[in-house]
Image: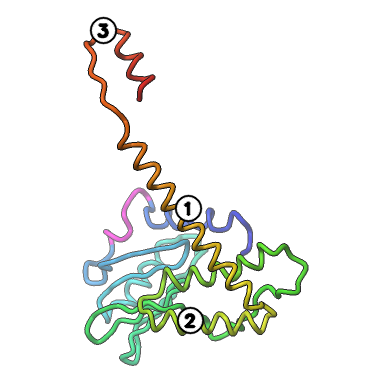
Amino acid sequence: MGSPVSAVIANFYMEKLERKDCREVLQNVDPRCRPKIWKRYVDDVLDVIKKDQGKNFTDHLNSIDDTNSIKFTYEEETNGVIIIPFLDLLINRQPDKTVKIQVYRKPTHTDHYLHFQSHHPIHHKSGVVRTLMDRKDTLMSTEDDKDREELHIRNALKSCGYPKWIFDKVKHDHCQKRKKTIETNKRNKSAQESKGLAVIPYVEWLSETAERILT
């Protein structure tokens, strides 16, 4: 844990496990407990499976590795609330069958981040703000949840010494970056649209050379 190569090695191992002996493990499982969806990130898996088949499928996965190096565990939807944590997501399946996405924090989460008075470059500290705000903007489903999450972030970082101006700076930098991206895309599109069309008689060797130069 913590090594830069950990995720790479874990991915290699899990891919080998999924395709052991060149067979698709998910295809060889008993059809009654075969998942409809299997989404994996490193060693975290989200799958959709029949309600009473979670244990059977987990036992099947744990029977694959002869070395006993890895053991799968599972969590199910419970208590009618139907909430599943997956990575930084809290996936909440609503009664109307829609899915609501929120930010997930473990019960042991303390909201302690890099302190603003610590001896680190300012871009490290602004990066903390930017990462949390980007996660809020990209992961969460509803505007109300985004507002509550932003308030939570601001209060948590305030307790870590972060002043108001660092939030304003991150927001300004984000707007400037977005504006620059839009302008760059417009220039690129305009440059593509301004390219002319040249039609010349085909001359062996010469036409191929001209095409390479003009394109």
Distance from the alpha carbon under mark 1 to that under mark 2:
27 Å
Q: Residue at x 33, y 89 (%)?
A: 81
Q: Position of residue 161 (x, y in %)?
A: 70, 80
Q: Is residue 27 magenta?
A: yes
Q: Residue at x 49, y 63 (%)?
A: 175
Residue bounds of the magenta highlight = 21-28
The residue mark sitting in front, 1 or 2, is 1
Q: For the image shown, how many numbered marks are present on the structure?
A: 3
Q: Amino acid at mark 3?
A: Val
Question: Residue farthest to the right?
Answer: 119
**Dividing the picture into quarters, in which one does residue 112 lie?**
bottom right
What's the mark number on residue 54? none
Q: Is residue 124 placed above or below 107 in the rendered structure?
A: above
Residue identified by numbered label 2: 149
- Please give left or right for residue 126 compared with residue 196 in the image: right
Tell me, yes or no, whether the two marked residues, 2 and 3, touch with CB atoms within 8 Å: no
What's the mark number on residue 203? 3
Q: Residue at x 54, y 54 (%)?
A: 9
Circle 3 SS class: loop
Tell me, yes or no, whether the two marked residues, 1 and 2, touch with CB atoms within 8 Å: no
Distance from the alpha carbon under mark 3 to that under mark 1:
43 Å
Q: Is residue 172 placed above or below 153 in the rendered structure?
A: above
Q: Amino acid at mark 2?
A: Glu
Residue identified by numbered label 1: 180
Distance from the alpha carbon under mark 2 to that under mark 3:
65 Å
Q: Position of residue 150 (x, y in %)?
A: 50, 80
Circle 2 SS class: helix
Q: Nearer the viewer, residue 183 or 74?
A: 183
- Choose the circle earlier in sequence order: 3 or 1: 1
Q: Main secondary structure of the magenta part?
A: helix
